[in-house]
């Protein structure tokens, strides 16, 4: 999968926010860095690829997206995973 196709897939899945899972680590970083959930979702939907698409050791495709949201540069490391209900976007960490 290339950067553009992974970006499209993440945006497609994240268009239904119930299919976005935010890890405990990412929630902690969001609090520390004063990043709102709306900014994270905006990054998933509109961000551009800052670190290229690659497969992690579990076989999930992941990348880092970034976008200017509410005046802040937000970076979100995300992966596409599957469960019994379908595909999900997992937010691994959040940076600004």
Image: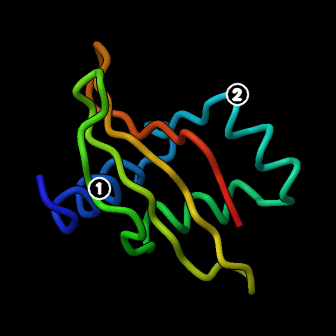
Q: Nearer the viewer, residue 17 or 66?
A: 66
Q: Going by the picture, which residue comes out furthest to the left?
A: 1
Mark 2 — residue?
Answer: 24
**Disc on res. 51:** none
In the rendered image, residue 78, in percent from the top left (x then y), is placed at 45, 46
Q: Is residue 64 above or below residue 85?
A: below
Q: Nearer the viewer, residue 27 or 64?
A: 64
**Disc on res. 12:** 1
Kindly report the distance in space between the C-alpha atoms of the residues bearing marks 1 and 2: 23 Å
- Residue at 26% x, 26% y is 86
Q: Going by the picture, which residue comes out furthest to the bottom?
A: 71
- Residue at 49% x, 40% y is 20
Quarter assignment of residue 35: bottom right
Decide if residue 9 is on the left or right side of residue 96.
left
Q: Is residue 80 above or below residue 40?
A: above
Quarter assignment of residue 95: bottom right
Image quadrant containing the C terminus: bottom right
Indicate how the structure is coloured in the image: rainbow
Decide if residue 16 is on the left or right side of residue 40.
left
Q: Nearer the viewer, residue 12 or 63?
A: 63
Secondary element under disc 1, as helix, strand or loop, is: helix
In the rendered image, residue 34, in percent from the top left (x then y), is placed at 86, 59
- Residue at 61% x, 82% y is 68
- Residue at 45% x, 64% y is 65
In front: mark 1 or mark 2? 2
Q: Is residue 34 above or below residue 14?
A: below
First-in-chain label (1 vs 2): 1
Secondary element under disc 2, as helix, strand or loop, is: helix
In the rendered image, residue 19, in percent from the top left (x then y), is placed at 43, 37
Decide if residue 44 is on the left or right side of residue 29.
left
């Amino acid at each position: 999968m290339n950067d553009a196709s992974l970006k499209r897939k993440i945006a497609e899945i994240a268009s239904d926010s119930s299919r976005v899972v935010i890890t405990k680590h990412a929630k902690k970083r969001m609090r520390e860095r004063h990043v709102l959930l709306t900014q994270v979702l905006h990054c998933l939907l509109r961000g551009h690829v800052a670190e290229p698409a690659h497969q992690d050791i579990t076989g999930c495709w992941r990348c880092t997206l970034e976008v200017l949201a509410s005046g802040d540069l937000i970076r979100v490391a995300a992966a596409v995973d599957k469960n019994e209900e379908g595909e999900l976007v997992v937010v691994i960490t959040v940076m600004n």
